[in-house]
Image (cartoon, helix red, strand yellow):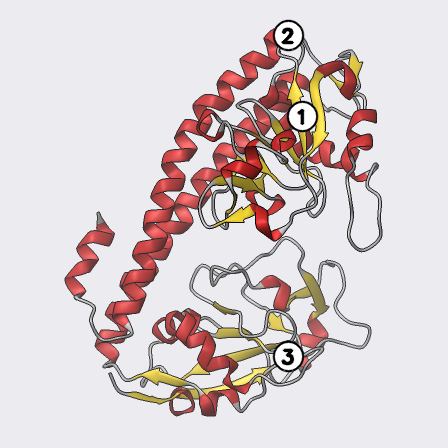
Amino acid sequence: MKYEKLIKYVDTLESGARPKGGASEFSDESIPSLGAEHLNDDGGFKFDKIKYIPESFYNQMDSGLIKTNDILIVKDGATTGKISHVNKSFPFQKAAINEHVFLLRLNEEKAYPSFIFHYLKTETGQKEIMKDFRGATVGGISRRFMELVNVPVVSLQDQIRIADILSRTESLIAKRKESIRLLDDLVKSVFLDMFGDPVRNEKGWDTFKGDHYSALLTVGVVVKPASYYTENGVIALRSLNIKPNYIDLNNLVYFSEEASNGVLGKSVLHEGDVVVVRTGVTGTAAVIPKELDGVNCIDLIIVRPKKNILNPQYLAFLLNSDRGKTLVASREVGGIQKHFNIGAIKDIPFPLPPVELQNNFASVVEKVEATKVKYRESLSELEALYCSLSQRAFRGELNYNISNVVNN
């Protein structure tokens, strides 16, 4: 496949600005101001913490005014090169970028913006952008990056076809993620309806501390000599594997069976144990499922509930709830690196409804989780399909009839 410099297809490359004092909270006559924090990892946008500039300032800006089909690129900082596309679903009629973002506007008679966006979002495209990266503490790229970036030479008609296939695959990925999110919201709603707010405890449940509801409350091994690790062996879960209410089996490490059964035996996990993050995203909790019975862990709080008092699913969802996080945050220690120690979880008086009611909630969780497992598998397949399609497309190997697969 042939390549040409990106600059050949560029009409304009602009950055934005903010008024003196910066952007501010919403007012009736104000315009959204997007920065690096508003570009997400999927090539879209996060609008939950938008800041605004006065419309009078927006009207005076001579660059950085967002239009449909613009490509936005983070120009400096930790997320340099992150990229998003302003498509027809962009919710604002008027919006601008701040000084930390580039706005790339293409000549649409020469290049299809969605095609260029999908290419620049690939690993190869990101490497091309970062050819211009410079600086140490707060590095970034300059306007010169568009003179360095190579893009595939593809007919405009084929660019449209490729972009359409990749966009539809991305749409399916987004829908699957939304389905998972809605299931999470459903369980949260059921939890609050059954048990109420765990901080206010307006339903008047009896409260108990850790020594009452746990048969075991300890911390997994912290000291980790290199000799304990093997390429294969017994899984050793770390904080990065613990997500709210589930175990992420990516980025695993392993202990030797000898070490796990011997000197590291105190941190072996069993079905129904609740593991809680001690350092990092403190308080994040998940239940060990049957298929992970016997794995080990590193620097996690282990709670083994007494079955006649506490259902593990109830404790995990309580800790992961917004109000549960408030309880955890009130007991954190440390400065930049926060810790949630075993003494803290022992000391928090958790409301404990009758275990029969907790078990009813766990039955709901079990049914929802079974559906989410299927959705996560489907999501993984779609993400793998997108990766394969994009790689083949930008090597000139994509059979356009593959769009039939996406349609189905």
Amino acid on which disc 2 is placed: Asn
In 3D space, how far apart are the residues under numbered discs 3 and 2 (Cα atoms)?
60 Å
> Residue at image x 25%, y 68%?
392
Which residue is disc 2 drawn over? 308
| Mark 1, secondary structure of its residue | strand
Which residue is disc 1 drawn over? 303
Asked if residue 143 is positioned above or below residue 351 in the image, the reply reads: below
Amino acid on which disc 3 is placed: Gly
Disc on the earlier residue, 1 or 3: 3
Amino acid on which disc 1 is placed: Val
Which residue is disc 3 drawn over? 16
Q: Is residue 283 left or right of residue 186?
A: right
> Residue at image x 77%, y 71%?
22
> Observer-nearest residue: 42 or 362?
362
| Mark 3, secondary structure of its residue | loop
Percent across and percent down for residue 287 are 56, 28
Disc on the earlier residue, 1 or 2: 1
Asked if residue 215 is positioned above or below residue 6 in the image, the reply reads: above
